[in-house]
Image (cartoon, rainbow, N blue to C red):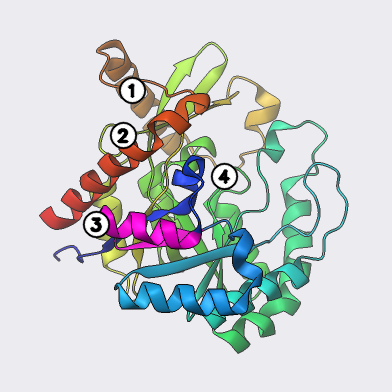
Amino acid sequence: MPMKKFKVGIDAYSLKPLGLDPFELLDWALIHEAAGVQFSEVPAEAGDKALLKELAQYAAENDLYLEWGGGEHIPFDVITGKAKDIAASNRKAVEQASAMGIRTVRSCSGGLMRWREDAPPTETYLRDMAASLRPQRRTFKDHDVVLAIETHFEFTTFELLRLFEMCDAGPGDFLGICLDTMNVLTMLEDPVAAARRVLPWVVTTHVKDGALSLTRDGLVSFTAEAGQGLIDFRTIFEDLSAQPHDLRLSIEDHGGDFVIPVFDPAFLAKFPDLTVQELGLLLRMAAETQDLLQKKKLAILDRNRWPEVCESRVERDLRAIQSIVEEG
């Protein structure tokens, strides 16, 4: 089956150092032949309803897609434990998206809880999230909007599927996935395997390349320029192609690396769904990464350097992903 000719756009976070307003971001997309913009972080101007409609009209006039953010799925602050009214913030994001004709709202509520010894067990998070999200079904259904929970440094795809089951939600209902193709590495998931686990649920994407290295501290995940890392985009895109609903490929990129202390038994125990087979795939990736690092074909980009390289790298990311899609 031939690959769909996906629309390839950008996530606004990638260009955050440029300080562009929403219209300037759309202009950047036009100039650089991107097909649209995902505002995974809601712009400060989003409170102006007239501006939102103007933004949607400008995008439509220029044949650009828009995707929205501002959603939340963890009903308390992951650092302080203080309760949060995510129903109110979700309603606000849903109403903004609906006013612009957007059918998804991306949600990323925090991250790296597993890296903290004092964090509650994952099952506690899942239970509390389900209790909070179930009553919000009507809000999302009434506006025909899906909450797209990002595969971030919070929950594995196994756990998100359990959350959906606890919420009595099926694919295409009110909960879905924003598939970040690199973040899953940090959660000890092979990108292809992770994508296949949640395929029917994927409603938006963060297309990001990356790799894994093996150090004395454990595995280290890091971002890479699209096409330079080890994410098997072609296979993932082919799998996404088989889905009946429309999907866009929104490129998200940034610098930085993340230590995954897999030699710590207590830390590794927090990933009960990790299989020997999948760990083997990750270790093979780490071996391939080491070879590329030694040959200087790959390098970790310090997050502090992102502002100086972001524009040129996102341009190259676009060309690389567009080329994969065009080749089919």
- From the image, state whether disc 3 or disc 4 is nearer to you: 3
Tell me if residue 309 comes above or below residue 173 in the rendering. above
Q: Amino acid at mark 4?
A: Asp
- From the image, state whether disc 4 or disc 1 is nearer to you: 1
Q: Amino acid at mark 3?
A: Glu
As drawn, the label of residue 273 is 4
Mark closer to the chain start, 2 or 4: 2
- From the image, state whether disc 2 or disc 4 is nearer to you: 2
Mark closer to the chain start, 3 or 1: 3
Q: Nearer the viewer, residue 50 or 236?
A: 50
Q: Please tell me whether mark 3 sits on a helix, a strand or a loop.
A: loop
Mark closer to the chain start, 2 or 3: 3
Tell me if residue 40 comes above or below residue 185 in the rendering. below
Q: Which residue is mark 1?
A: 289
Mark closer to the chain start, 3 or 4: 3
Q: For marks 2 and 4, give the CA distance.
A: 23 Å
Q: Which residue is mark 3?
A: 33
Q: For marks 3 and 1, give the CA distance.
A: 31 Å
Residue at image position (57%, 44%) is 273
Residue at image position (38%, 34%) is 210
Q: Which stretch did the figure color magenta?
A: 22-39
Q: For marks 3 and 4, give the CA distance.
A: 41 Å
Crowd around label 1: few <14 · some 14–19 · many ≥20 (10 Å)? many
Q: Is residue 195 left or right of residue 84?
A: left
Q: Check if mark 2's residue and mark 1's residue have beta carbons within 8 Å.
A: yes
Q: Please tell me whether mark 4 sits on a helix, a strand or a loop.
A: loop
Residue at image position (54%, 74%) is 52
Q: For marks 2 and 1, give the CA distance.
A: 8 Å
Q: Which residue is mark 2?
A: 230
Residue at image position (31%, 36%) is 312
